[in-house]
Each structure stands twice: as structure tokens, then as C-alpha cells.
């Protein structure tokens, strides 16, 4: 009986020690996993432990001119970085607001031939393009029943002021078909007042569909996938020819898309580089406006 009791007590002690050892090992493994997760999370952020600046995803639509030309023959990393520095310096002097194709804008430039030495033009943005310091946009307006278009270089030193009178987007990225549309779609008064917009509100999408004049046109619009144009009412042979010359396979060509765009990783680096400076410039403008309002009062 004594031997049996000693054996039972020894068995109980061994079981307790094994359970304690397993508990310690489990807690050690859990702490190690937590440490590894924290380290991996930190590495995903920044290996040096610094906070990584992530720009909002809408920056690629608000500031597309900061993205370099995707053509590999024209890429130069040093030139692109110097251009971004010059662009930010120019933005610190003149405010270049957010705008899209379809927005109604007013641009004031220095003009030595004008009696007031400045010229102001109001029109709708029908196209924008270019990259870096070569970024540009086109404004169109109908003046005295005559269509007038002016191409502005966004970072031209002659530009004194850029105003957005109506901020909106259209169904198409290019509105060149307004050249063949009725005049009322491109007519805006030069004394048009800017429309007020709430801060951080969504940019409205104008679903209007314009009506084109009868042929002949400047381009074969039936061969382009246009969403903002009414039915063209053309004979069927025009649409059949458009199908023959169409290239529907291009939207599945991944290499073609790769050559026409900047990789997402590089876009994030570029916008993270300019994000803080753009925020600082915006804050300084707001402070100057508040000081101006306080001085007027």
C-alpha cells in the first residue's frame, strides 16, 4: 500500500510539471508570434521604424501631371524629381486648384498687348494632358458665334490666376467632340460667378449627353466609344465600318497597358513625396485667407 501511494504521488507531480512546462512553452510561442507579427508589421511600414506617408488614392486623378511620361525612351529619374520640385515651387506662388475634364474654368494671364496688361478667358476644359512641367489643358468657349479654344501650359510663368467656376466631371475623358456639337454646350458668360462647393464633398458627375451637328465632322466619332453623345443617327454602313476597324483585343493586352501606365508602386512613392508639401501649401493658403478676412473686418 505504501509503495502504491508513493507511485501515485510521483505520477501526479510528473503530470503537473509537464503541464506547467507545456503552458510555459505555449506562452513563449505566443509571445514570439506576437513579436514576429509586430516586427513584420513594422517592416511592412518601414524597416527603420519611421511612419510611412501614404497619399490618398484620389491623388492620381487630382494631380496626374506629377506622374512622369510612361514612355521608357523619355524616362529620366533625376529630371523627373527636379521637375516635381519646380512644380511644387510654382504651386507655392500660384494656386492651381483641382479640376477635371468638363470643369468650367477661368484663366488670367499676363498680356502685354492688352490695355489692362492681363487677359482673362472663361471656358470648359475639353482636354488635359502632358506630364511634369509640360502639362497642359484646353479651354473652349463660343464667343460671337465663333468657337474659341486656348491651350494653356499649366506651369507657365505668364499665368497669374486659375479659377474653377464649376467643378464637375463628364462621362468621357476627352470632350473634343464639342467642336462638332451645338454651340449651347460650349457657351459660358465671361462674368460667370463661381459656384460654391462644400469642402471634402464628392465631385459631381454630369451625365449630360450632347447633340452633334449633322456631318461632316472633324473626326469619325462613331468609331470612338463615346458615352456623352446622343445617338448619331447614321446609316448602318458607318457602324459596320467602325466594327471592322475596331481593336477590341487591346483592352486585354496587358503589356500595352503596362507600357502606357506608371506602376502603382511608383505612383505611391511619387504621391507620398509630394503629399506633405501639398498639405502644407493648402494650410498656408487657408491661413492667408483667414488673415485677409480678419483684416477686412
Image: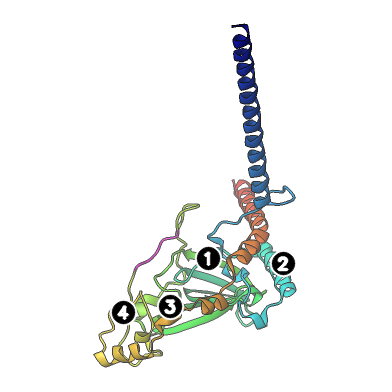
Locate residue 235 relative to residue 80 in the image: left or right: left
- The reply to whether dot 4 and dot 3 touch (C-beta < 8 Å) is no
Locate residue 59 relative to residue 235 in the image: left or right: right
**Number of the front mark, 1 or 3:** 1
Secondary element at image label 1 = helix
Q: Which residues are magenta?
A: 203-207
Residue 240 in the image: x percent, y percent? 29, 90
Residue denoted by label 3: 175
Residue 251 in the image: x percent, y percent? 44, 77
* Label whose residue precedes the other's in the sequence (4 or 2): 2
Q: Residue 142 lies in what quarter of the image? A: bottom left
**192 and 57: which one is in front?**
57
Q: Residue at x 66, y 75 (%)?
A: 133
**Number of the front mark, 4 or 2:** 2
> Relative to residue 23, is residue 243 depicted above or below?
below
* Label whose residue precedes the other's in the sequence (1 or 3): 1
Residue denoted by label 4: 211
Locate residue 189 relative to residue 241 in the image: left or right: right
Q: CA distance from mark 4 to mark 2?
A: 43 Å
Secondary element at image label 4 = loop
- The reply to whether dot 4 and dot 2 touch (C-beta < 8 Å) is no
Q: Main secondary structure of the magenta part?
A: loop
* Label whose residue precedes the other's in the sequence (1 or 4): 1
Amino acid at each position: 500500500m505504501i509503495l502504491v501511494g508513493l507511485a501515485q504521488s510521483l505520477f501526479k507531480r510528473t503530470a503537473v510539471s509537464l503541464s506547467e512546462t507545456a503552458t510555459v512553452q505555449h506562452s513563449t510561442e505566443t509571445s514570439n508570434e506576437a513579436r514576429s507579427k509586430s516586427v513584420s508589421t513594422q517592416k511592412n511600414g518601414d524597416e527603420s521604424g519611421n511612419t510611412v506617408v501614404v497619399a490618398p488614392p484620389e491623388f492620381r486623378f487630382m494631380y496626374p501631371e506629377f506622374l512622369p511620361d510612361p514612355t521608357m525612351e523619355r524616362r529620366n529619374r533625376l529630371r523627373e524629381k527636379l521637375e516635381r520640385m519646380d512644380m511644387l515651387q510654382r504651386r507655392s506662388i500660384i494656386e492651381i486648384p483641382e479640376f477635371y475634364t468638363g470643369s468650367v474654368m477661368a484663366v488670367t494671364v499676363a498680356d502685354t498687348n492688352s490695355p489692362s496688361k492681363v487677359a482673362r478667358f472663361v471656358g470648359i476644359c475639353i482636354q488635359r494632358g502632358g506630364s511634369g512641367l509640360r502639362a497642359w489643358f484646353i479651354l473652349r468657349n463660343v464667343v460671337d458665334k465663333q468657337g474659341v479654344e486656348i491651350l494653356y501650359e499649366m506651369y507657365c510663368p505668364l499665368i497669374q490666376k486659375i479659377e474653377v467656376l464649376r467643378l464637375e466631371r463628364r462621362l468621357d475623358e476627352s470632350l473634343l467632340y464639342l467642336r462638332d456639337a451645338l454651340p449651347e454646350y460650349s457657351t459660358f458668360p465671361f462674368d460667370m460667378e463661381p459656384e460654391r462647393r462644400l469642402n471634402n464633398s464628392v465631385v459631381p458627375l454630369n451625365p449630360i449627353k450632347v447633340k452633334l451637328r449633322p456631318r461632316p465632322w472633324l473626326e469619325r466619332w462613331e468609331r470612338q466609344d463615346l458615352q456623352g453623345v446622343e445617338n448619331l443617327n447614321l446609316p448602318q454602313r458607318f457602324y459596320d465600318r467602325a466594327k471592322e476597324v475596331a481593336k477590341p483585343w487591346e483592352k486585354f493586352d496587358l503589356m500595352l497597358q503596362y507600357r502606357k501606365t506608371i506602376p502603382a508602386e511608383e505612383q505611391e512613392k511619387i504621391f507620398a513625396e509630394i503629399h506633405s508639401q501639398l498639405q502644407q501649401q493648402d494650410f498656408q493658403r487657408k491661413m492667408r485667407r483667414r488673415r485677409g478676412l480678419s483684416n477686412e473686418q
